[in-house]
Amino acid sequence: MKALNKTAALATLIGGALLLSGCGGDSREAIMEEMLDQFDAITASMKKITDKQSATAQAPKLEAIAAEMKALKARADKIGKPDDAEDKALQEKYKERMETSMKGMMSEMMRVAMLGPDVQKELDVLEKAMKDMD
């Protein structure tokens, strides 16, 4: 049960990072696309995890993805929040891809959480790396 709580907390952090950043890259739209690409990269990495050994092997990759997401958030913070019209347009444009990316990522996070605490411990690196994104 603890693993599921950690997974839910991490997903909340990631979802919050997406909403904070944007809704948009140096243009908000570019940042949004790059953030979604990072979510897909997390999903792809998680799909490779089947046990503690594979989790250990994926930890550096997940840490690098988290670092990239922090950089994306910093870029988004630099350009500020979109106005209501731009926010609505971005949400509308990326709604389907956002839902698909988040669904895939959440599914893999839940699957990996079920592999047990030894596996989950190896992935704490992702959770720690993303804590300061809010």
Image: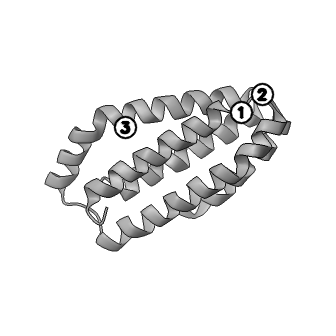
> Nearer the N terminus, badge 1 or badge 2?
1
Q: Is 134 placed above or below 119 here?
A: below
Q: Is 14 placed above or below 98 here?
A: below
Q: Which residue is mark 1?
A: 49
Amino acid type at image mark 2? Leu
Amino acid type at image mark 3? Met
Q: Position of residue 85 (x, y in %)?
A: 14, 52
Q: Which residue is mark 3?
A: 98
Q: Secondary structure at mark 1?
A: loop
Q: Can residue 55 be seen by looking at this rendering?
A: yes
Quarter of the image for residue 45 reads top right
Tag 1 and tag 2, C-beta contact below 8 Å: yes
Gap between marks 3 and 1, in whole Å? 23 Å
Q: Secondary structure at mark 3?
A: helix
State which mark lies toward you, 1 or 2: 1
Crowd class of label 2 (few under 14; some 14 to 19; many from 20; radius 10 Å): some
Q: Residue furthest bottom?
A: 78
Q: Position of residue 29 (x, y in %)?
A: 26, 54
Q: Is 34 placed above or below 134 here?
A: above
